Amino acid sequence: MSYEKKLMEMKKLVKKTTKETQTPEKKKVLPPSPFYEDKWLAAGLTKEENSHGIVYKRTISFDSTYKHGNIYLSDLNNALKKWGNLDETHPLAPDLEKRLVFFDTETTGLKGTGTLIFLLGFIEQTKCSFKLTQYLLPGPDHERAFLYASGLWEHNLNLVTYNGKSFDLPQVETRWTMNRNSLPPLASHAHIDLLHGSRRIWKEEVDSFSLVNIEEKKIGFFREDDIPGHLAPIIYQDAVKSGRIDPLMKVLKHNEWDILSLVALYIESTDLLFETSTRGTAVSQTNIGKWFADLKLYDRSSRVLESVILEYGLEHPVTHFHFGFIMKRRLAVEEAISSFTIAADRLVGRQRIIALEELAKLYEHKVKELEKALQYTRRAQHLLTVDPELTDRFRLRQQEMFQKREIRIVRKLFPGEAQ
């Protein structure tokens, strides 16, 4: 027998031996249904089974005439049309190639790998209604089934949340990582965080950015007989120990209101962002104009700020402060000077000092009136010593900057004098 044939025979023998010595794969044993299943089903939950175990589900449909607070859910169509006509990017703009889903969670704690998500809530617009789906975790043994049932692995979505960037999505990612050996990879989702948008739009207009406060002040929704969010983990833990479902159904109602408020808040925020007249207040519209400027959408910023100035005149000098930067960018020096002068005369604190700095810059470099540049420089230097609203850090930094500016302007004014 040749060497090659002997080698082939040895390979066959090895394969045969390996096959004979393999142990049969253990059959996957799924955790059983909890003892309280009948109570949960009687309360209106449904049971869903998958390859990882079971999960309980609650589904509700809201028709197109449903109103949450002051907002009709069907107005979401108009909001999406507005975003579809926007050529620029914006943090609240959805990826129109992905489904738009409003999403919220309830967890057993605030953070840590030991914290479980026990409720995943989604609402999505269908052809003629809005469908709310809530997945409820039966217990820790069913976590893989619970996460799998959510479908967050199937499609790339637009997930709209409130504080989801800091809380909900990191929690989902953590739990997915803990179960990564059993679950398909988590899909890559676009994310819109309405907490960020609310802070940009209503800064200095509301005293708290909790969702409950925003929904009362901005969408006109008031909760009745609500479960405080911090009690939800205690209620859930009691439910899986005792099977008591009534308090837990109130947690699901709390989550339902959270998600409906996301839809209404998204509609309201979109309407304010695209409104050509001052539908909001001078504060919110000025905040929106500044937001557009920060995104380098200067034409939109200018239109919003101009509309506030036309309606409120000198009543809201902060608008003139931000409009001054738009005019400066456009090289409209006279308009910029006019806006910064109003701001410098009517504001206090940090913005007044910055307005004076801008005036000093414009008169020194653009208008070439060094006396006025020096005048605004020295006025700012005085205010830096007496304005109680300035922080020490800002005060010291600006004092150094204005001192250098003063020296430079004096040298220009009196070039022949000894230093």
Image (spheres, rainbow, N blue to C red):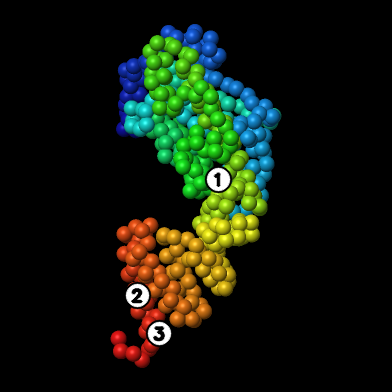
The amino acid beneath tag 1 is Leu
The Cα atoms of the two marked residues, 3 and 2, are separated by 13 Å
Residue at the spot 62% in from the left edge and 53% down from the top edge: 87
The amino acid beneath tag 3 is Lys
Q: Earlier in the sequence, mark 3 or mark 1?
A: 1
- Secondary structure at badge 2 equals helix
Mark yes or no: residue 156 visible.
no
Q: Does residue 274 sit above or below 195 in this rendering?
A: below
Numbered mark located on residue 361 in the image: none
Quickly name the residue at label 3: 412
The amino acid beneath tag 2 is Lys
The Cα atoms of the two marked residues, 3 and 1, are separated by 49 Å
- Secondary structure at badge 1 equals loop
Residue at the spot 63% in from the left edge and 48% down from the top edge: 279
Numbered mark located on residue 92 in the image: 1
Looking at the image, which is closer to me, 296 or 224? 224
Q: Earlier in the sequence, mark 3 or mark 2?
A: 2
The tally of labels here is 3
Q: Does residue 285 sit above or below 189 in this rendering?
A: below
Mark yes or no: residue 399 visible.
yes
State if disc 2 and disc 3 touch (CB < 8 Å). Answer: no
Badge 1 crowding class, 10 Å Cα cut-off, few under 14, some 14 to 19, many 20 or more, is some
Looking at the image, which is closer to me, 331 or 384? 384
Numbered mark located on residue 404 in the image: 2
Q: Nearer the viewer, mark 3 or mark 1?
A: 3
Q: Residue furthest left?
A: 419
Q: Percent x, y for residue 349?
A: 41, 60
Q: Percent x, y for residue 5?
A: 35, 29
